[in-house]
Image: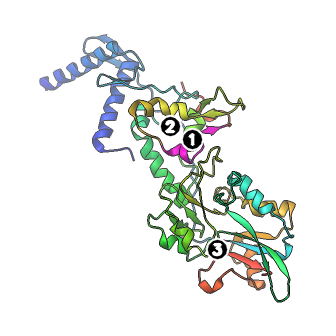
């Protein structure tokens, strides 16, 4: 952490000499009174414990409560994470989108919000050549943009089209949601909010100003509301046949 | 024994000489004038200046992996903490509260001709007031 051992010695020596220069009082040649202030501990670091593998974050979306044309979740995500907005639909990133699915036999249709499904077996992680695409201990699938080289293999591998490439230069990012040109990005389940004990922005907005179609929680905790609902009701996962074990469950599709 | 105490005397005398010759706080090292970024308004960094000058990138690199991959938040060295103290007012900004850390980084990075990549993704600005917890340094 503090560099090579010789460098550490170097710095210690320099600090001693600097302190001598500042706090030393020369009484006579060869005699010094040292008035060295004690080292100042500025901040007591209080780090959180981090992601735990006892937790599996999941989302349950009841599409029966999704009004036709409602995009409250999409705009909440855009505001929270600062994506979209250049107006070029072909290249604008898209962390969450609404897809209208129609049953050709009955003619019934429903609007479905689709984002990263946070698979337990994520193909985007399998194909990433740099290890930038990874799954956190609590099941959230993320891109470490420090390591992302923008090859877009993960976008090819994802059956949900959940990830986007940032084509344009980005400015005025949110402090907690860094984004940069030449990297791939996608839904993070608002990881900065979760780590602070909150819920994703889409879930909050849907509950506050739309149908309350989204339920978020820990699938591993049998007492959580989402785990009880998933146990009680039949839920669907998109392309369940692929066996990726997504964390996002749907009702009504 | 006598030789040792003589050596100590010489060393201490040299230190005393240095104390006289070097102006306090002057950032010189091996005869090379160093870039001197403005001190944070709060007065005191997380580590002494010479440690930060050499190791800030190591601290940040280590902690960024812990945060991004491990979800560990609020540890000692974060880029947001750098920005919180070292960001300076932006003269041309419409928002008077807006401060940017870029001039602070540029003070050394331009001098050393080292490109800093952090701010191609992270925002260098903040509108938060200076942290008061750090403001009581001598």
Q: Tell me where residue B70 appears, x and y as whole percent.
A: 53, 60
SS for callout 3: loop
Please state the extent of the stretch shown in magenta in the rendering: B117-126
On what subunit does the disc labeled 2 rest? B
Rounded to the nearest whole Å, what is the CA distance between mark 2 and mark 1?
Answer: 9 Å
Q: Tell me where residue A95 appears, x and y as whole percent.
A: 67, 62
Q: How many C-alpha atoms fall within 10 Å of the one at disc 2: few (<14), some, or many (≥20)?
A: some
Looking at the image, which is closer to me, A88 or A111? A88
**Which residue appears at 50% of the width and 37% of the height?**
B46
- Colour setting: rainbow
Q: Tell me where residue A226 appears, x and y as whole percent.
A: 74, 74
**Which residue appears at 33% of the width and 39% of the height?**
A8
Q: Is residue A139 left or right of residue A83?
A: left
Magenta span contains residue B118 = yes
**Which residue appears at 86% of the width and 64% of the height?**
A210
Location of mark 1 (residue): B81
Q: How many C-alpha atoms fall within 10 Å of the one at disc 3: few (<14), some, or many (≥20)?
A: some
- The numbered disc on residue B46 is 2
Magenta span contains residue B112 = no
- Tags 2 and 3 on a common chain: no
Cβ atoms at labels 2 and 1 below 8 Å apart: yes
Classify the position of the C terminus of chain A by image quarter.
bottom right
- The numbered disc on residue A160 is 3
Q: How many C-alpha atoms fall within 10 Å of the one at disc 1: few (<14), some, or many (≥20)?
A: some
Corner quadrant of residue A114: bottom right
Disc number lying in front (2 or 3): 3
Q: Is residue B92 above or below residue B74?
A: above
């Amino acid at each position: 952490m503090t560099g090579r051992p010789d460098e550490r010695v170097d710095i210690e020596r320099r600090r001693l000499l600097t302190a001598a220069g500042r706090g030393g009082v020369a009484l006579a040649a060869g005699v010094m009174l040292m008035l060295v202030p004690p080292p100042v501990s500025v901040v007591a670091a209080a780090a959180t414990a981090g992601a735990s593998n006892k937790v599996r974050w999941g989302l349950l979306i009841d599409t029966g409560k999704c009004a036709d044309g409602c995009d409250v979740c999409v705009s909440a995500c855009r505001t929270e994470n600062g994506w979209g907005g250049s107006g070029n639909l072909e290249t604008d990133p898209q962390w969450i989108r609404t897809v209208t699915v129609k049953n050709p036999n009955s003619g019934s249709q429903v609007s479905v919000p689709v984002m990263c499904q946070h698979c337990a077996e994520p193909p985007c992680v399998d194909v990433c050549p740099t290890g930038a695409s990874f799954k956190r201990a609590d099941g959230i699938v993320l891109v470490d943009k420090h390591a992302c080289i923008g090859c877009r293999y993960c976008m090819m591998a994802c059956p949900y089209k959940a990830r986007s490439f940032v084509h344009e230069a980005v400015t005025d990012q949110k402090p907690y949601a860094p984004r940069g040109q030449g990297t791939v990005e996608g839904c993070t389940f608002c990881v900065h909010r979760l780590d602070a004990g909150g819920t994703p922005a889409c879930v909050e907005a849907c509950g506050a100003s739309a149908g309350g179609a989204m339920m978020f929680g820990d699938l591993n905790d049998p007492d959580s509301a989402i785990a009880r609902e998933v146990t009680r009701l039949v839920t669907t996962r998109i392309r369940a046949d692929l066996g990726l074990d997504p964390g996002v469950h749907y009702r009504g599709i | 024994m006598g030789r040792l105490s003589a050596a100590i005397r010489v060393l201490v005398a040299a230190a005393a000489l240095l104390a006289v010759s070097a102006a306090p706080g002057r950032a010189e090292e091996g005869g090379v004038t160093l870039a001197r970024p403005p001190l944070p308004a709060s007065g005191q960094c997380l580590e002494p200046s010479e440690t930060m000058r050499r190791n800030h990138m190591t601290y940040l690199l280590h902690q960024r992996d812990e945060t991004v991959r491990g979800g560990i938040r609020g540890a000692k060295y974060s880029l947001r903490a750098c920005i919180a103290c070292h960001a300076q007012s932006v003269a041309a900004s419409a928002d008077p509260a807006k401060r940017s850390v870029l001039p602070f980084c540029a003070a050394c990075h331009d001098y050393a001709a080292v490109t800093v990549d952090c701010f191609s993704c992270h925002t260098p600005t903040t509108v938060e007031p200076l942290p008061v917890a750090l403001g009581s340094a001598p």
